[in-house]
Amino acid sequence: MSVRKAIQEVTDRIAQRSATTRGAYLDRIAAARDEGVHRAQLSCGNLAHGFAACSPADKARLAGARTPNLGIVTSYNDMLSAHQPYETYPALIKQVARESGATAQVAGGVPAMCDGVTQGQPGMDLSLFSRDVIAMATAISLSHNMFDAALYLGICDKIVPGLLIGALTFGHLPGVFVPAGPMPTGMPNDEKSRIRQLYMEGKVGRAELLEAEARSYHSAGTCTFYGTANSNQMLMEIMGLHLPGSSFINPGTPLRDALTREATRRALSLTATGNNYTPIGHIVDEKAIVNAMVGLHATGGSTNHTMHLVAMAAAAGLAITWQDMSDLSEAVPLMARVYPNGVADVNHFHAAGGMGFLIRELLEGGYLHEDVKTVWGGGLSAYAVEAKLIEDALTFIPAPAESALPKVLASVKAPFAPNGGLRMLTGNLGKSVIKVSAVKTEHRLIEAPARVFHSQDALQAAFKANELNGDVIVVVRFQGPGAIGMPELHKLTPSLAVLQDRGFKVALLTDGRMSGASGKVPAAIHMTPEAKNGGPIAYIRDGDVIRLDAEAGTMDVLVDPAEFFARAPATEDLTPQHFGMGRELFATFRNLVGPAEAGASVF
Ligand SMILES: O=C(O)[C@H](O)[C@@H](O)[C@H](O)[C@H](O)COP(=O)(O)O
Ligand code: SF4
């Protein structure tokens, strides 16, 4: 089957299965648009409250219905190095809006959790749920109904998905996502990981480890590995929700500011009061979602998007499945080697030709839909560019014909692998996903006895007690969304990597998650159904032999089914993990949340 045919087949089946829900969604946003410019719907009291704190000039503009007003939804805080630069964005955006004869107001702020700060800590149990809280906070911000378009300021893991889910409930509004860019390259990510492993083996002390970590994460901007945050940037650009070439421009640079200014002007040009009305609900269609999945596979993106993309698509009335992702993975080549899928980082990816080169290559190879709506106008070929400042003017030049760093970013004709980085695994334990792009070929087939744990701390204790020295598939269960909120278990990576480097065949099986930055150890994650809901993972016992075959896409426990399911499933009193660090506030989420394959959503 030709590539174009394979891509079209997945696109068509998404459109077919979503016809009713997508149709209803489009009707809703058409009705919302037909109500006209929303400030005109407000009472004088509403409006006066809405502009009470504005300058007289802004008030005069806001009192009418013709001058576009931008709503800024910001996720600024000082916890995420990636979001810290947003502190100054609203002032810049307001200035540009005024220069354009319009206005801009901060509609609201959304919470943003740094998974790096909470990794391995109780706070991580709130991480996945924070995505849906962010979606709700985005809706609360926009529900003031004062706006003709919105600018979404968010980068990291759950924040972009949450912002987009919220934005799509206001799908009648045009929206532009505004990135802030990666921090400059510090200590290479693989060197940081090497020092972590030395620490786990007791070969370096805490002071040395902290010094290495601080040299890796050293300034404002997104961490430079290709985890969920930078996967988000790739997705927003390939879906046409960023300006072209804007994802990986470093913060605090003239080009970064020029792109933020242009994003502001662009959002103002897309409103219903103008001639180029482009609501976000029309941009995010089945073609954009398929382009997103293609980009995820081609770059070896984060496993978290096997859930976030499902939830984002659903917010636009589109139903996508892990089978869709798996079928696309078979068809799409791996073109990027960025940590954890290599030693380079996103600054190197950008220097190699970045998103413009990637998009041009994938378009020419027939892997992407070109005929899509974008915030920039025209089809996706307008994104096969690099953004530059030439004599202080923001200029978009064609992406380079060749990759400047072929070991980081390959051509579509000579990819690093013939298929994508993400796979679905099926078998008698249920469905899970695995990121193969970061796993060496020799580690992709493992048959080994299970060692079962009900927490990552218990596993770490067994590692420190030297109980895991041998081939082993470690099973960490009761980590699912309904159990404790589906934390990332990325803190386990150094220990498991030490075992792998000692020559043992090691894999992880969990109903929890891993970081998008997790890599070299094969991990079957998001196991569905989860242990808390009596999934087969709850029946596994120490010593059961499990076979993981990432190439074949299978994972099975090699125990007679009659004997296996005659066992009583394991249970676990999770009460201690339902209190403290605010977790007591999320009982409703744990009770409502759907399965990982449906996006682990509470909506
Ligand atoms: O999905 C992701 O990309 C991760 O959640 C990432 O955002 C998180 O910060 C990691 O924990 C960073 O890696 P380290 O924990 O190795 O620094
Ligand atoms: S990439 Fe991860 S660790 Fe870095 S700022 Fe974002 S959430 Fe935090």
Image (cartoon, rainbow, N blue to C red):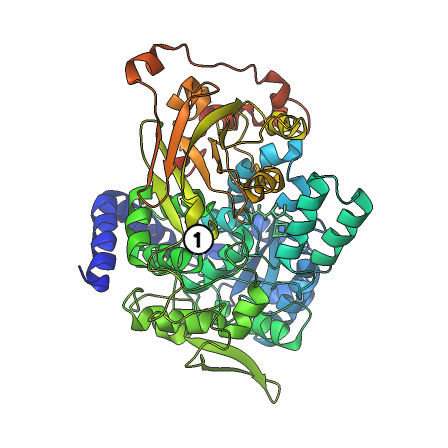
Which quadrant, please, contains the N terminus?
Answer: bottom left
Pinpoint residue 443: horizontal percent, then vertical percent. Answer: 45, 45
Q: Position of residue 351 (x, y in %)?
A: 55, 74
Disc 1 marks a residue whose amino acid type is Ser
Does residue 584 lie above or below 80 as drawn?
A: above
User: Could you say which is closer to the camera, residue 502 or residue 54?
Assistant: 502
Taking 355 as reference, is 535 above or below it?
above
In the rendered structure, the answer to whether residue 216 lies left or right of residue 208 reads: left
Crowding around mark 1 (Cα neighbors within 10 Å: few <14, some 14 to 19, many 20+) is: many
Q: Where on the picture, by quarter, is residue 593? A: top left
Instruction: Work out which quarter of the rendered image holds the C terminus and state it.
Output: top left
Q: Secondary structure at mark 1?
A: helix
Expressed as whole percent of the image width and height from the top left, the position of residue 372 reads 32, 65
- The residue drawn where x is 50% and y is 33% is 471
Image coords of residue 18 (percent x, y):
25, 45
> Between residues 152 and 10, which one lies in front from this camera angle?
10
| Residue at numbered disc 1 | 437
* Residue 246 in the image: above or below residue 489: below
| Residue at far right of view | 207
Residue 171 falls left or right of residue 465: left
